[in-house]
Image (tube, rainbow, N blue to C red):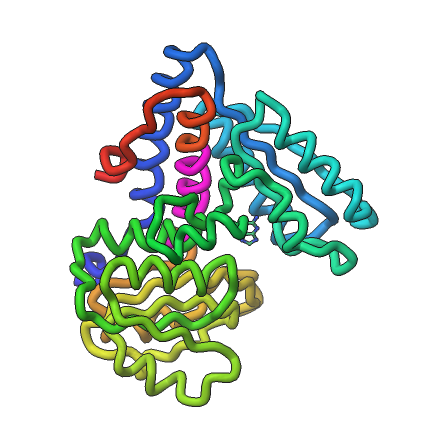
Amino acid sequence: MNDTKIIDGKLISSQIREKIRFYGDKLKDKTNKTPGLAVVLVGENPASKVYVKNKIEKTKEVGFNSIEHRLDESVSERELLSLVNDLNNDEKVQGILVQLPLPKHINSDKVLDAIIPIKDVDGFHAENVGKLWSGLNSLVPCTPLGCSILLKKINQDLSGKSAVIIGRSNIVGKPMAALLLGMNATVTIAHSRTKNIRELVKESDILIAAVGIAEMVKGDWIKKGCIVIDVGINRIERNGKNVLVGDVDYQECLKNASRITPVPGGVGPMTIACLLLNTLFTSYIQFGEESVDLTSILD
Ligand code: GUN
């Protein structure tokens, strides 16, 4: 019974990556060019190192070129901007990802806005953000895009449904709100200053938890039939072991939820699949090919 509730992001993401490989191979055959994704990692943040390692591995698996730049924590903003400029002009690079967070002495907004919008596979450039909020075609941030694909996969018509997002980050919360609005949901964004989060969640048909606090959402917060999408990846110690948990108490929330994503194996692998999907998309455009029909990849 509970198995049918689980949204298997691991399986869905692997199916998407297979299709990306297929369309990537087609593009390579036609143009004699290989899509390239450049990943820039600054410093030694342990979580960032793991994310970047996984991104690079999956990039190679779908047959794309991976271009890696690891910079010392002490790198200056000017040096980083200069690298971004080089990558903008590099014909072998179709997508640029600068892993966040950046060290405090670097202005992240400035760096993200230096990436030319057509290589902005993270969808963080102001031009892509503006287009997303205007309902225009744009590159969409990978994690919220992954969540919206999961919601479409479970065939839920969100029209008239209420959705609450916990977390107002530029990476997840805000773009997720734009996507849910586009799917005709009524959207609330809750954050650390929101007074009645528990009540808001209790009234919601859809919950997107993207707050970064281990198991913050308790089982009795969940309305019966709620769809729960857990974006959190928190490392905690339990019974003397290091384990990964989400932002919701999975075992307890499972009881009232109609569908729920596990951690790990839910949203996490979808983020990487969407990064590759965005890279495929920008490659088709940069290689001068008719844009690939993304809907056929997502069917
Ligand atoms: N740090 C956490 N999530 C992300 C992401 O989706 N993209 C980048 N560039 N950095 C991140």
Which quadrant holds the N terminus? bottom left
Instruction: Please provide the residue range marked out in magenta.
Output: 266-279
Q: Nearer the viewer, residue 248 or 206?
A: 206
The residue shown at (37%, 64%) is 177
Q: Nearer the viewer, residue 146 or 2?
A: 146
Residue 125 percent location from the top left of the image: 54, 49
Which quadrant holds the C terminus? top left
Q: Nearer the viewer, residue 172 or 221?
A: 172
Residue 128 percent location from the top left of the image: 47, 48
Residue 213 percent location from the top left of the image: 51, 72
- Residue 85 in view, yes or no: yes
Task: Say above or below: 111 vs 190.
Answer: above
Residue 207 percent location from the top left of the image: 32, 70
The residue shown at (45%, 43%) is 272
Residue 183 is drawn in which quadrant?
bottom left
Residue 147 is drawn in which quadrant?
bottom left
The residue shown at (53%, 26%) is 36
The main secondary structure of the magenta stretch is helix
